[in-house]
Image (cartoon, rainbow, N blue to C red):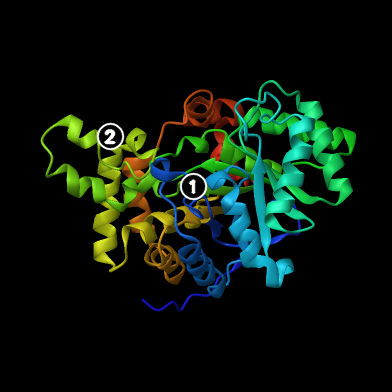
Amino acid sequence: MDLFVCMRYKLLGKSGLRVSELCLGTMTFGQDWGSFLRGASKEESKNIYNLFVNAGGNFIDTANVYQNGNSEKYVGEFIAKDRNRFVVGTKYTLSTNPYDPNAGGSHRKNLFQSIDASLKRLNTSYIDILWVHVWDYMTPIEELMRSLDDVIRSGKILYIGISDAPAWIISRANTISELHGWSSFIGLQIMYSLIERTPEREYLPMSRNLDIGITSWSPLGGGVLLGKYNEETEKKETSNELKRLGNDNPLASTFKNERNLIIAKVVQEIAKEIDKTPSQVALNWIRQQQKNQRGSIIPIIGARTQKQIKDNLGCLDFELTEDQLKRLDEPSKVELGFPHDFIHSELIKNMIYGNSYSLIDNHRSNLF
């Protein structure tokens, strides 16, 4: 399959940083994790990287723990000839030594030692975005934000983002930073896809109102949205056999249930109708959420083969129709829960604004 795609670019959050509309996830760059998560050889990783870059991609995501550090090493080697062209994000927080209590967490000591180690593996003098990988409840918010600001002032990192943390903590962290004049988070990484839409309750409204850019990891639901488990399930007769499907992704087993397989079936049906692949349909659903006033979301695409990255990049060639988006929304939507459904009900809106609610030209209507 030849690629004839042209990557467009977006501002990440309230920064002036331009990033490609797809982000290349490199958790599969390397093979040190063995059966836990099958990765790609160095040669295949370079081929995947080249295809992404040739399509116009400049946004690359890695982490200090991915493939025991080899992901960062590969990325550093691949970008070396044109370092300034790329927006490279890496992460810290997860432990790099289970026998050292300070080798994990978001505290100041681990932050400084993690950055120095990542800079060495990436073979660069600066990191574009440093992501706090997972929220560490032991480290005070004030310590974290002050330490991150210090590292930005040192020039070792340019921007900060956060992944896998409660929305209220992110809001509080940025508020504290603004009050102190410290740097705040410009980006957020969350699990978001057709089978994981619960971020619509808190994360998406928060990010839209605080102007925090969103990147979505596992946009294909651990492979469930590709439909391969639907096809294989039809051939299986016992639940034990179903549980063994998807061992190539450690998260897939948590995603395989009746609801998600129904969603995957709709994805397959639409893909067949428009002669596209399920992955392209699922990725485009995420890319087109901006039209639904939920803010711009950048999928993080990962691959172990050239075929997979080509397939994913093919999502840039088309858009889903309103009818197709509606068909995908129906089986996948989630209840917003209290207080959102309560506040958004017609009864309560009319009780707040009176009978004139429907006549008000509300410039904040996207909040409803």
Q: Which residue corresponds to mark 2?
A: 257
Ranked by sequence position, the earlier of labels 2 and 1 is 1
Tell me the residue at 43%/64% (across/down). 309
In the image, 307 versus 109, the foreground residue is 109
Q: The residue tagged with tag 2: helix, strand or loop? A: loop
**Residue 117 location (% of width, % of height):** 72, 45
Tell me the residue at 36%/33% (across/down). 254
Tell me the residue at 78%/50% (across/down). 157
**Residue 135 location (% of width, % of height):** 63, 30
Tag shown at residue 32: 1
Check the image and name the residue furthest to the top: 138
Q: Is residue 292 left or right of residue 162?
A: left
In the displayed structure, would residue 343 be above or below residue 303? above
In the image, 366 versus 118, the foreground residue is 118
Q: Is residue 266 left or right of residue 196?
A: left
In the displayed structure, would residue 302 be above or below residue 132? below
Tag shown at residue 16: none
Asked whether the beta carbons under mark 2 and mark 1 sit within 8 Å of each other, the answer is: no
Tell me the residue at 29%/47% (across/down). 264
